[in-house]
Amino acid sequence: MARETHAVPGAQFMDPAVLARIGNLELISRAVADGFINGLHKAPYFGASVDFAEHRGYVPGDDVRRMDWKLWARTDRYYIKEYEAETNMNFSVLLDVSKSMDYGSRGITKFEYARILTACLTNLVHHQRDRVGFVAFDDEVVEYVPPSAKHMETVLHVLDRLKPGRPGNLKKPLHKLAEHFGRRGVVVIVSDFYEEPEAILDAVSPLRFRGQDLIAFHVLDPTELEFGFSDAQPFEDLESGEQMPVVPEAFREEYRSLVTAHIDALTRSFAGVRVDYTMLDISKPLDFALYRYLGSRAKMMKVR
Amino acid sequence: MQFLAPLFFAALAGLAIPVLLHLTQREKKQIVRFPSLMFVRRIPYQSVRRRKIQHWLLLMVRMAALAMIILAFARPLLDSGTIPTGGANAREVVILVDTSYSMGFGDRWTQAQVAARDQIAQLTASDRGSVVLFGSGADIQLRSTAERSRLQATVDSATPSPSSTRFSPALKVAGSILAESTLPKREVVIISDFQRSGWRGEEGAKLPQGTTLTPVPVQGASDKPNLSVTGVTFARSAFSDQQRIVVTAGITNRTEQPVKGSSITLEVGGLTVGTKPIAVEGGSSTSVAFDPFTVSGKNMRASVKLADDALAADNTFNFVVSPIEPVHITVVDRGSAASALYLTRVLSIGTTPKFEAVFRQGDALSDEDLRKSAVIVLNDVEVDAPLARRLARYVEQGGGLFVAAGPRARWPQDVDALPATIGPPVDRTRGDAARVGALEYGHPVFEPFRAPRSGDFSSIPVYGYRNLTAAQGSQVLARFDAGTPAVLERNLGRGHVMVWGSTLDVSWSDLPTKPVFLPFIHQTVRHLAGYTEPEPWLTVGQVLNTSAVAARGPAAQRVVLTPSGRRLPLDDEGTDVLELTEQGFYEIRGDANQSDGIVAANVDPAEADLTPMDPREITAAAVGGDDGSAGPQAGVPLTPEAKEKNQRLWWYLLVAGILLLGADTLLSNRMAKA
């Protein structure tokens, strides 16, 4: 399985915290993506381009250039050749830049992790000659780079400038974006999904219903998972600023179970609408996320 | 509650310390910025709340401990050992009931009792009442009790007394009861006929601040007239070696209606000796003289009585009559008529008392003379040592000795009895004559000359006198203008010795020819003889000195029979005085139950004047303008034990504070472990 690929030469992806210290996103993404590609050169699904899929009968209106003349010669019937995949698909990353993403307990924030992830994915996809696009949102669309084969540099540049600042809300920006994405493609959502599972589902549904292939990356700091605080302290919500006295010892178990329940609920909900959902612990290297992406791509192709 | 060290309350600011500690501790704790409290918020609030309450508890415990310790250091002092009882409306009511004899007029006393019962009936369960009966003094019958039945019984059993009305002692007593009260409301009710004579207005009777004074005037009317005997006077005369007395009684009609056809009776020794008809116009006075009667013995009881009228107590006037005993004097002189002329003349005048003087030459003075005489006068004679010793002994046993130190006077040096050493004569015939001055007017001899124009000694020229030197223990009563003592007195044993530095004839001074000579000699003899005029009557409320009435025997063996027949043994604590509380005759009996003396007691005639006053005058004086000094407890000095007891609270507070600190430690430890 892809998770056990640490032994693959050249695939020792650097610790995200170390990567975060390198300012140049392009350099990072290239380094990560190149190494990744090199290590996966035997991957059977990667690089699938204009593969023949099937023949179908000609109907008036079809492009005569796609007519299989050889088959006509043999059978005296008109057939159109159909190909396996769209080679130039649209690939967009929707990055949550709400304030809650600006949190990290291990030297890297969720935002930085998500940014590197985005850069890497963009780089990877760009090398596949796909069109890359990028959207940053909190409770509004903050940045929008339309998908294009030439937009990788722009995407990296925009990524570089981004700073999380405002409270987030998935529904409003995602519904808006669903209307923009006319052409089917792959949409990756990177967020910490601090909303009720129903609300999240409601937010992503329009995208899904318009035929986008959705991949959801749920980035979480290990502290958010473990709640490893010890002293009784007041906690402040990064987005709302609300403060609460918290006694971690008394809260921990309940908190963990609530987070687990949340993740489980998301997994179930996303699975229900055939969205590929992955929870990413930002203390873990990026390769896991990338494998996950590619894995999901493979699954989709199989399904299709 | 008061505090001995209220400055410590400044430390209450220290109560902020635990609060600040709690707050700063909270500040110090870094606020954890967490992406979302979405899940934290879902954790049941109860657990958060419980934690908070525990913190509050800790804070409260710490603050309470600090407050207790500060309170302890402020040394709280309880104002009273008792906690005030009753509600905010509990009253301390003092009911002052006038029991002067004027309350016996008409139905006043019945009205007063009804009014007092009404006041008692108004007391609620939380109230406390006191009953004070007052006349010239005030007597607390029941002090601050909630038992209404006892208060009622006290009022029911009270009767008017023969005393006169005085409001101020009653108000002072009421003030003292109220000052000790812890109840919030204080009231004084005066039930009286409010006679003008009972209030002089200057007596400083102030009730504690906030006291309500309610006067309840009783004005019982009567259709009967009210006559009163205001006093009697005596006119004594001698009739064939017996003394006869004419008694004249003064009668006043206190009402407006004239009295005719009534009579007045004189009783002596229980027998009626005369009755006279009287007629008195309304609001006027008259006097009635009875026929003379013979005073047959000592201490005869006599009364003047009027017929019954609206006020009975002032209808009888009691007095005691006795024949006046003469004062026996022995004058020792040279036997010359000229030297004793003035003295003889002076001593022959006078009826109260009568002086009976005998004249002896120095060597003829017998022991019998000494025994009979109350006073010995040495009129410029030479006294040898044996005579001097006899005279000294005589004085020590209670006799009086008067020495006129003329040119021949001589007293042996070795007999120390005179108040002065008799020095050489001083001749003032040339130049200005000597004058007598610097009189000791406080002395009984010179007391009659105290007032202006009551005799002038300084106008008397003295041409010669003996240079007297005051002896140890003597008193100079007058001096010559050169400063030499002129009159001296010395107490020797039970008697007195006086020395006059000049003669009692005209050879050395003009004194015998001057008007002051007679009163001077009379006063001197009376003083040396220890003569006091017997009082024919006293007034109820006065104090009777039994030893003055009955000279014989120690007080412990005397018994006083009161008019009501009670026997009052005079205790052996040396008290031989007695306050007269009844109208009638008090008899003093010595050992063997024989009568030593009789004293008549009469009601105060001023009380018979029923002219009322405006009670508001008393209210204004007793309640208005409080000086603030009469707060609660003002007049009640606390014993040291009570003071200590009242201050002991600090100890408990300190212990409570320490216990709270212990509880705080336990609590915080437990919370830390939790």
Image: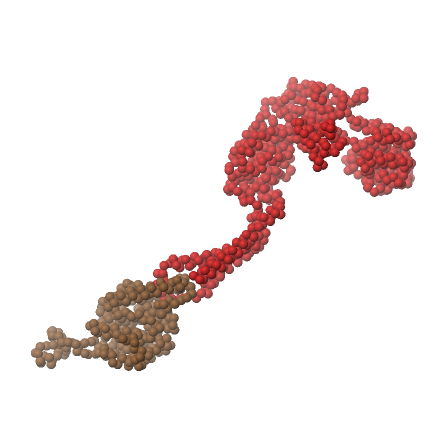
Q: Tell me which residue sits at (32%, 65%) in the image.
A: A260
Q: How many marks?
A: 0
Q: Quadrant of residue A225?
A: bottom left
Determine if residue B485 is in view: yes
Chain B visual colour: red
Residue B15, percent from left and from top = 51, 57
Q: Quadrant of the C terminus of chain A?
A: bottom left
Determine if residue A207 is in view: no
Relative vertical location of residue B602 with respect to residue A87 in this rendering, above or below: above
Q: Nearer the viewer, residue B206 or A4?
A: A4
Q: Tell me which residue sits at (23%, 73%) in the image.
A: A299
Q: In the displayed orientation, state which residue is furthest to the front.
A: B592
Chain A visual colour: brown
Residue B127, percent from left and from top = 53, 38
Q: Tell me which residue sits at (75%, 32%) in the image.
A: B553
Left or right position of B644 against A8: right
Q: Nearer the viewer, residue A294 or A236?
A: A294
Residue A271, percent from left and from top = 25, 67
Relative vertical location of residue B170 with respect to residue A50 in this rendering, above or below: above
Left or right position of B460 against A50: right
Colouring of the image:
by chain
Residue A208, percent from left and from top = 24, 68
Q: Quadrant of the N terminus of chain A?
A: bottom left
Q: Quadrant of residue A146?
A: bottom left
Left or right position of B496 against A255: right
